[in-house]
Amino acid sequence: MPISRQKNIEYLKNNPDGWDVIVIGGGATGLGVAVDAASRGYKTVLLEQSDFAKSTSSRSTKLVHGGVRYLAQGDVRLVREALHERGRLARNAPHLVKNQKFIIANYKLWEQPFYSVGMKVYDALAGKLNIGRSKIYSKAKVIDAIPQIKHNKLVGGVMYYDGQFDDSRLAVNLMQTATEYGATLVNYVKVTSVQKKFAKVAGVTVKDEFTGEEFSLRGKAVINATGIFVDQILEMDTKDHQATVRPSQGVHLIVDGSFLGGNDAIMVPKTSDGRVLFCVPWHNKVILGTTDTPLKEFTLEPRPLDEEIDFILETAGEYLERKPTRADVLAAYAGLRPLAAPKDGDGDKTKEISRSHKLFSNESGLITITGGKWTTYRQMAEETVDLAIKVAELPPKDCVTRELKIHGAKQTTEAERKDWRYVYGSDQAAILRLQEEPELALPLHPKYEFTGAQVVWAVREEMAQTLDDVLARRIRALYLDARVAKEMAPKVAHIMATELGKDQAWEEKQVNEFCQLADGYILQ
C-alpha cells in the first residue's frame, strides 16, 4: 500500500490523543526508535522537520563497523557493542549491508605484525557475530586486490572485514518498516513546542512546513532523537538548559572507482591529524574521508572547508598511484556529528570525544538520546524504548528488533550488486513492473541507470516530497555525481510534478532550489 504523507497528516489531525510514543527526529536514531516502539506494539508517531536522514544520517562514510580507531583508544566496550550490532544489521538488512574487505597497507616492516595483532583482537571482540577473519597479505596480494595502491616501498598489508552500506536507503527502509508495524511517520513537520501537564511532558505542537498549519499531539512518552538539534528541543523543555552536544564536521569526497581499481578498500590507520582515513568503494565510485573539524554552528546543509578538502586529497594521494585532485571530485559532502561531549574539556579535540551515545530523561519526563553512530542505531533504540517504558509507565513489552528483518530484506550476491537497483531488495520486482510503462523505463541520464520508475516509486512508496529528497537520498545521484544530478533535475521534477499534481511553477522552483543546493557539492 502506498505511503501518503498527506493521509498521515490528516490522520494525525483527526487523532491527536492516545499516542504511546512520540518520536521527534527522523534520522537513524529516531527511525530506529520508531521501529522498536511500533514492533513492540506501542502506538507510535515520528515527526521529522525536513526529510528522513536529511542531515547527518545521509552523510556518513557508509560503513557498518566496530571502529578500529576506538579500539586503538582503548574503548573496548564501544567496539564490542558496535561489532555485535554490525553482525545483526548484516542479517536483518542483507540487501543493503555487505561484507567489505579493508586493507591496511604496510610500508614499514614492523607494521605488519603490529596491525595483525590489533585486527585479531578486533575479530575476537565480534564473537559469534564475526563476519570474517583478518589475514596477512603479501605485497603481491595487496596490489592484486587494489591495483592502484602506491607500490613504492610497499611491504605487504593486513586485510580485515567490516560492513559497508547505503545510509539513506537504510533510513527509507526503516521508515517503511515502522509503517508496516503500525507507526505513523511524517516528514516536513516541525515541532515548535513541548506541551506539559502538571509539569510533565504530555505532547507536542507541530507545524506543517508546507502549509504552515499547526496542530497538537498528546502522548505518554516524548523522545527527543533530533541528532545535532537535540538542544533546541531541550530548550523548549528547560529554559536554562546547557548545551549537551558539540558538533564535529566530517567531510567526504567522491571520485571515480578507477582510483582504487579493485573492490577492496584502504584503511589508513593514522593520518597527520591522528585520525584514520578510508578509501572505500561505493556504487562504482570511491569515498575518500573523513575529517573531524570542530564547529560552532548547526545547519542542515554544512559545507566542506578548503582545508578539509586539501587534507583528504593530500592524504589519499600518499597511498594511491594516481593522486586525486579537486578536478577529479564528483561530489563533496559534509555532515555534522552530534557528539555527546563531556561538560568540561577541550572542545577542539573532537576526535577524542566519545562516540558512545548518551541517554537521559529530564524532570519533565522528556527523553533524549544523542551521540552514537549508524552501526549502533538499533541498540540505542532498544535502550531508549526501555527507558520510555519506565519513565512513561507504559505496559512492559520485550524488544524484538534483534532478529527483525528490515523492509526490503533479501539475500544479495555480488553479481546482483552491479545493478544499482539491488538497494531496493525485495521491492525490485515492483519497480520493474512500473518500467513496463515505456516512459518510465527511460534512463534519467545517459551516464547512469536510474529510471523514471524509481522516481515514481520514491514518491508513491518512500514519501519523497522534493527534488532534493529524490536526487540526494532516494537514488543518491547528488552524492555520486553532483553535476549529473543537476542535469537530471528538470526531468525528475517533471515526473514528480505529474505524480504529486503540481504545476510548472512548482517544477521550476524545485529545479532552481536544487541546482543551488547541488552547487555546494561541486568543487570550484
Image (tube, helix red, strand yellow):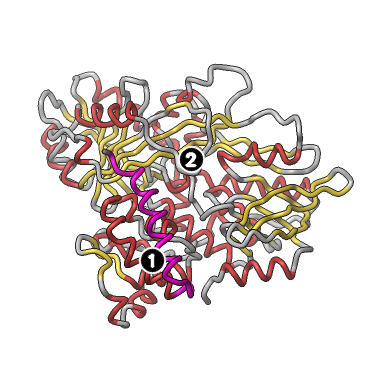
Q: CA distance from mark 2 to mark 1?
A: 39 Å
In the rendered image, residue 428, in percent from the top left (x then y), is placed at 36, 71
In the rendered image, residue 140, in percent from the top left (x then y), is placed at 11, 36
Task: Give the residues drawn in magenta, as a range.
Answer: 499-523
What residue type is disc 2 on? Ala
Give the camera-side residue of 378 and 472: 472
Categorize mark 1 by other alpha carbons within 10 Å: few (<14), some (14-19), many (20+): many
Quick check: 247 above or below 111? below
Q: Say which residue appears at 60% left-offset and 57% top-offset.
A: 209
Q: Is residue 509 magenta?
A: yes
In the rendered image, residue 83, in percent from the top left (x then y), is placed at 45, 41
Quick check: 106 above or below 182? above
Q: Say which residue appears at 44% left-offset and 74% top-offset.
A: 499
Q: Relative to 501, is 17 on the left or the right?
A: right
Q: Relative to 281, is 93 on the left or the right?
A: right
Residue 98 is at least partly visible in this image: yes
Quick check: 356 above or below 410? above
Pick the quarter of the image with the C terminus.
top left
The quarter holding residue 170 reads: bottom left
Residue that mark 2 sits on: 82
Q: Relative to 193, is 321 on the left or the right?
A: left
Give the camera-side residue of 156 and 187: 187
Residue that mark 1 sits on: 493
The quarter holding residue 307 reads: top left
Residue 58, disc: none
Give the camera-side residue of 281 and 130: 281
In the rendered image, residue 321, in percent from the top left (x then y), is placed at 12, 33
Q: Say which residue appears at 25% left-offset and 36% top-offset.
A: 266
Categorize mark 2 by other alpha carbons within 10 Å: few (<14), some (14-19), many (20+): many
